[in-house]
Image (cartoon, rainbow, N blue to C red):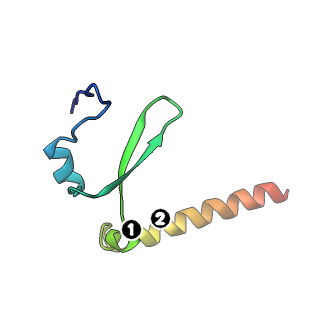
């Protein structure tokens, strides 16, 4: 989606993007600056809003993978 920045350095988030992300008027957004010059814009909300956003079991698998990677890095640093 393309948007145009106004003379006041503002832009309108297209309706399709708002609907896809669930962003509504008054919601807060967080902007992350990427090293490659890009930006990432994400809605800010309570952690409880994330409940149910992943299929059952996917979070457990991600936690297990992260813990395994962290343990492997620990073992490599201990050598």
- Location of mark 2 (residue): 62
Marks 1/2: CA–CA distance: 6 Å
- Location of mark 1 (residue): 58
Q: Tell whether label 2 touches label 1 (CB within 8 Å).
A: yes
Image quadrant where one finds the C terminus: bottom right
Please tell me whether residue 16 is drawn above or below residue 77 in the rendered image.
above
Residue furthest to the left: 15
Please tell me whether residue 12 is drawn above or below residue 68 in the rendered image.
above
Residue furthest to the front: 8
Please tell me whether residue 77 is drawn above or below residue 11 in the rendered image.
below
For disc 1, the neighbor class at 10 Å (few under 14, some 14 to 19, many from 20) is few
Q: Secondary structure at mark 1?
A: helix
Image quadrant where one finds the N terminus: top left
Location of residue 59 in the rendering, given as x and y in whole percent from the top left corner:
42, 69
Residue visible at 36% across and 74% down? 48
Residue visible at 22% across and 29% down? 2
Q: Which mark is residue 73?
A: none
Residue visible at 68% across and 64% down? 71
Location of residue 53 in the rendering, given as x and y in whole percent from the top left corner:
30, 67
Residue visible at 46% across and 44% down? 32
């Amino acid at each position: 989606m393309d948007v145009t920045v106004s003379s006041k350095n503002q832009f309108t988030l297209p309706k399709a993007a708002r609907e896809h992300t669930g962003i509504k008027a008054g919601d807060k957004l967080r902007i992350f600056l990427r090293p490659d010059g890009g930006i990432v814009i994400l809605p800010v909300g309570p952690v409880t809003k994330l409940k149910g956003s992943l299929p059952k079991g996917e979070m457990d698998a991600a936690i297990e993978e992260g813990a395994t990677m962290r343990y492997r890095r620990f073992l490599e640093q201990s050598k």
